[in-house]
Each structure stands twice: as structure tokens, then as C-alpha cells.
Image (tube, helix red, strand yellow):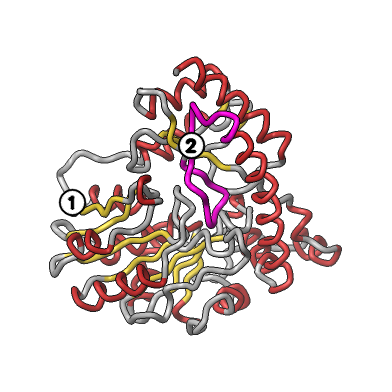
Amino acid sequence: MSTAAFQPFEMERWQSLYEHEVDLNLADSAVRCAPLGLLLGPRDLDELTDLELFYPEVNGTALLRGLISQTYAPSPAPDEVLVTVGASEANALACLTLLEAGDRVTVIEPGYRQVRGIAENLGCTVDVVQLRDETAWELDLDELRAKVGPRTKLLAVVNPNNPTGTVLSDEARAAILDVVESTGCWLLADEVYRGSERDGVETTSFWGQHPRVVCVNSLSKAYGLCGLRIGWVVAPQPLADALWRRHEYAVISASLPSVFLAERALEPSKRQELLARQRDLVRDGAELYARWLDEHASLISAQPTAATALSFPRYTAALPSEQVADAIRARGSVLVVPGSMLGSEGHVRLTVGFEPEYLGRALERVASVLEELA
């Protein structure tokens, strides 16, 4: 075990402290979550109330794993899918299985810093490939090749990206697979925003593109079902069984009611309905947000977003992002995420995946605070 000081998950702590204390929360990374009734028909409700609340299959029911498999091409085998308590458990299992103290891990930032934090807490060395606002958050392929070498054990990517909302180009995907092949590292692809693309064209998964690929997903982001806490990891054997063994230590299994509801959510027609609902919310919110950005161009600006409900705007106030976000929270009762907690100072992260009335009120409060800070 590493003797280094424990690194807390700053962004999640920020949200844990404040998300239930503000009037308006734009810090979450999903759309307005769907109501339970959207998943349940009359027969489903009867079945749900009759459930005997025992453990489901520890690795996920055969039905749920089969529905998950259908979302990939090629489809993973049944024993290559493990149902987890959210994507957060899936990412943690992959890190705890593949990494040990002294390993090198490469991450891409700005990004969701879970893998980075776990790696550092395990005693790994973390190398960062930095995305930049001035190049529209495009992956620098030369920097990627420089930061992934023969000592790298794991390369972690989030595609589509959190917080920038970008989608890797075909050239970038090919470069990632090339460095995996040439260095012998594993690729951990967090794909929780697959299905959130603004144009409706679902991002191709990394699954099946190389023997050393592990893919993670969940029902939280693109589906708007955060409260189910259902995720999954797709991995080749024997790694999949090694993940399962650690899953037994961590949680034993996901909740039976959540598994039941996840089976309904991933039924093909319901899955498409949920993804369409997410796109509708984001489209309406993004139109309002674009007008707001134009009206407040002297205070804040943002790159176009190809996927997710997120935006990662740059503000003009000459202050650290945590100070700016805290002022927005304290003075406006609106929660956003400081860019420093995602690896890029001078920015905040917010979501546009709400009804225009809710989003509009929140954005006007943000603008009022930014005017004071400027």
C-alpha cells in the first residue's frame, strides 16, 4: 500500500458539500433526470412491487448483461460483461485490478479525475496529456505519443469528453490504439456519454478495437438515470473474472430494484426514447445558452460542444476558478464546478440539460455574479 497522503476526489467533494444547499444546480454532469414512471408500464409496476428483495446475480442478470451486449459491435460475450454500482465502481475496479504502486498511468485533462486520483492513491505516477481551449480541446497527438511509453501501464480516456463535450476524431482514435499496441499498455475507455451526441450519431465504442481494451459505461449520463446507480464494465477474459472478484469485495452486487429498472431502460425502444429525451433537453438548453453567451461575451465564452449536456466556458475575471465558483454559489445560490478540479484553470463546468425556465434563471444569476467579479 502507498504511504503517500490520501488524495480526496475534490470535484465530488465539492458537489457532495453543496449540491443540496443551492437553489439551482448546474454542477451535475447529466440532464434533468427521468422520472421513475417513464420506465414502468402497468405490468412492470406489479412486478416491481412483487420483487423479493434478495440479491440479484452478483455479476448482473443474464437479461441485463445481454441488453448491454447489444449496445456494442462486436457484442461482448456474456462473461465479458460485469454490472457494477455506477461507472464509478467500474473505473475503480479496473484501476485496482490493473495497477500497483510504481506503475505509470496517462490521463487526458481537462477530464473527470477519478482514475487520476485512484492511481495516485495507489502510488502510481500520473502523466497528463493536456487539452487546450485555444485549439478547441483537440487531442495533441504528438503529446499523446510523448506521454505514453514503454513504462505506461494504463492509458485512460473519456469519450465523449467530460467536461469539454468533444468527441475524438478518427485520427485521434487511431493514434490512441497505436500507442496501446506499441507500448503494451491497457486502454481504459470511459464511454458514459455515448448516446449524448448532439447530432444523434452514436460514438463508436473502443470495445473490440484491441485485445487490451476495457470499456466502462452507465445509465447515469446519456440516459438521465443517475439515481439507479447502474453501470458496467466490458473486458476480455481472464481480466473480466478478476474484476468480478474485486466487485465481490466492494459491493457484492448492485441493487435488485435498480437491476430490474435497468432491464426496462435498455430494452431497445425504451433506450432510444431515453436518448431522444436527453437530446431534446440539451437542444433546447443549448439554444438558450448560446443566446446567453452572446449577450455576455465580455464576461464568458465557450467552445462549441459536440456531445454531452456540458459546457466548459472560460470566464474573463482574473480570479482562480474555485474562487469564482464559490462566489457563484454563495452570492447566486447556483452550483458550477471549478475548472481547477478538472485540470484547467480559468474555466467552470456547467450543464445545459435542463428546461429553459430553470436554466435561464440559473444563467442570469451566474451572469450577475460574473459582472460583480469583473
Question: What residue does disc 1 label?
Answer: 123
Image check: 29 left or right of 134? right
Query: Depth-wise, is mark 2 or mark 1 nearer the camera?
Result: 2
Residue 125 versus residue 369 in the image, above or below: below
Task: Mark 2 and mark 1 in contact? Answer it, CB < 8 Å.
Answer: no
Q: Which residues are magenta?
A: 293-312
Q: Residue at x 57, y 49 (%)?
A: 309
* Left or right: 283 in relation to 346: right
Q: Is residue 306 magenta?
A: yes
Q: Main secondary structure of the magenta part?
A: loop
239 sits left or right of 163 in the view: left
Q: Which sits earlier in the primary sequence, circle 2 or circle 1?
A: 1
Q: Quadrant of residue 278?
A: bottom right
Kind of element beneath mark 2: strand
Q: Residue furthest right?
A: 42
Residue 301 bears which disc, if any?
2
Horizontal and vertical percent for residue 137?
38, 52
Which residue is found at the position 51% from the left and 23% from the top?
Answer: 328
Amino acid type of the residue that numbered disc 1 sits on in the rendered structure: Gly
Which quarter of the picture shows residue 332?
A: top right
Q: Decide which of 81, 349 is in the foreground and name it.
A: 349
